[in-house]
Amino acid sequence: MNIVMNILAGLTSLYLILIFIRVLMTWFSGMQYGRPLEILCHITDPYLNWFQRFSFLRLGAFDLSPVAAMAILSVAHTVFNTLGRGGRIRFGIIAAMLISAVWSAVSFVLGFCTIVLILRLIAYFINANIYSSFWRVIDSISQPILFQVNRFFFRKRIVRYSTGIILSILVMIISSIVGGIFISILQQLLIRLPL
């Protein structure tokens, strides 16, 4: 049984690498890869496409389904690896791994949003040409965040744009720190479960 689990751990690790390469290749869509890309797409796209059907994994122009797909593979790899080494696994460990995978995805989104908001704040202070395509993408990401944060904290009051951006950055950072502490405590509790 341990040998089978070790083989499955190795296969999930290899597939995770292939998924990562496939995602990276989508960032450089103008390049021609030829037959190797076709083979890679044939191997990875059915799995990735399964996650694309979940609308909550799309935030505006950004598709977070590859992050979810890689998180699930990472959990599966850890389960197989643990079973391969020890022969058994407890419910608490599986629950802690699932929570860790979900938090990794949420933490990634929070970090990404923080970077986008910082870029928007810099653009605001240096009076950058916000009509370029780069700044339009930044605005398409930052505006929904700013709207939600400002609506929550200021209700219908009008505040300065820079105040809204700074507050949104602070909310993202504090959420990331507090969430990380909470998830760490929760994981420790789950790992100690006797089940």
Image (cartoon, helix red, strand yellow):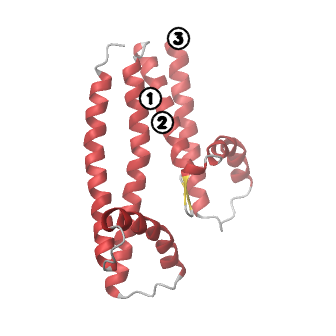
Q: Position of residue 126 (x, y in %)?
A: 33, 86
Going by the numbered disc 3, the residue's amino acid type is: Met
- At mark 3, the secondary structure is loop
Q: CA distance from mark 3 to mark 1?
A: 16 Å
Going by the numbered disc 2, the residue's amino acid type is: Ser
- At mark 1, the secondary structure is helix
Instruction: Tell me the residue at 40%/62% (across/down).
Output: 113
Task: Residue 74: give its label.
Answer: 2
Q: Nearer the viewer, mark 3 or mark 1?
A: 1
Instruction: Tell me the residue at 28%/20% (across/down).
Output: 192
Q: Position of residue 140 (x, y in %)?
A: 51, 71
Q: CA distance from mark 2 to mark 1?
A: 6 Å
Above or below, 25 against 88 in this view is below
Q: Residues within 10 Å of mark 2 (few under 14, many from 20)?
A: some
Q: Earlier in the sequence, mark 3 or mark 2?
A: 3
Check contact, mark 3 vs mark 2: CB within 8 A: no
Check contact, mark 2 vs mark 1: CB within 8 A: yes
Task: Residue 78: give its label.
Answer: 1
Q: Residues within 10 Å of mark 1 (few under 14, many from 20)?
A: some
Q: Residues within 10 Å of mark 3 (few under 14, many from 20)?
A: few
